[in-house]
Image (cartoon, rainbow, N blue to C red):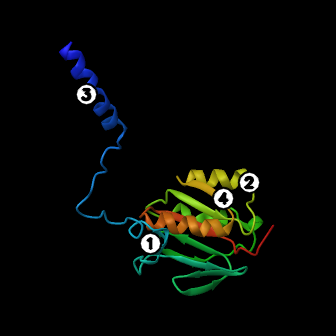
Amino acid sequence: MAVRERAVATLPKLIRSLRKEPPKPTYQQKLPSLRRAFSLYDQINLIDNVPEDQLRFQRYTDTGFTVNGVDYEGSLLCVGNLLMSWAPKKFSDITPDSLSMLQVVRPIPEILILGCGRYIEPVNPELRSFIRSTGMKLEAIDSRNAISTYNILNEEGRIVAAALIPYGVSS
């Protein structure tokens, strides 16, 4: 009987202690905020810190592009960090002959980004076959996205080529 009386007397205390919330842990130091370290602005701003010898498209217009602070009118052909004016004025002018210099470029770029102007255009099979024969992959996209893709791949240190028609040109 004594055991039962002790259990009955202890039960209310046990119930009261279970109803209480557990104490919250207290930290001696505040944890540092990661908001500043991983902000979107910092990620974008890293792109501005590229070496001087690396090409960086900064802007496009309907008639040309701005690369490393210099405005270029017309179509451009970029291989690695080399930039040159390019003859085709519209997408239909792009032929294997207009890209023939890609046969002698070493090291071979892993991808050719074809900036089609304002709209994505289908690449004719002859041109697609020619590009494959050089050992490159082909990505045909509008010129606005082509220059962004080029910047990203080039900053990653990948060997990439771009053939770009100005954004304002459509078929």
How far apart marks 2 and 1 lie (CA) works out to 41 Å
The front one of 23 and 51 is 23
Q: Picture coordinates of residue 46 (x, y %)?
A: 43, 72
Contact between labelled residues 3 and 1, with CB atoms less than 8 Å apart: no
Quadrant location of the N terminus in the rendered image: top left
The reply to whether callout 2 and callout 4 are in contact (CB within 8 Å) is: no
Which label number is shown at residue 42? 1
First of labels 3, 4 by sequence position: 3
**Residue under the point 18% across and 16% down:** 2
Residue drawn 30% across the image and 48% down it: 23
Residue at left 42%, top 77%? Answer: 49
Counting residues from the start of the chain, the first of labels 1 and 3 encountered is 3
Distance CA(mark 3)–CA(mark 4): 79 Å
Can you identify the residue that label 2 sits on? 124
- Report x, y in % for residue 52: 41, 81
Indicate the secondary structure of the residue bearing disc 1: helix
33 w.r.t. 50: above or below: above
Quarter of the figure with residue 73: bottom right
Measured as percent of width and height from the top left, residue 165 is found at 69, 72
What kind of residue is marked 4?
Ala
Q: Which three-letter amino acid code belongs to the residue tagged 1?
A: Asp
Residue that numbered label 3 is attached to: 10
Between tags 2 and 4, which lies in front?
4
C-beta proximity under 8 Å, tags 3 and 2: no
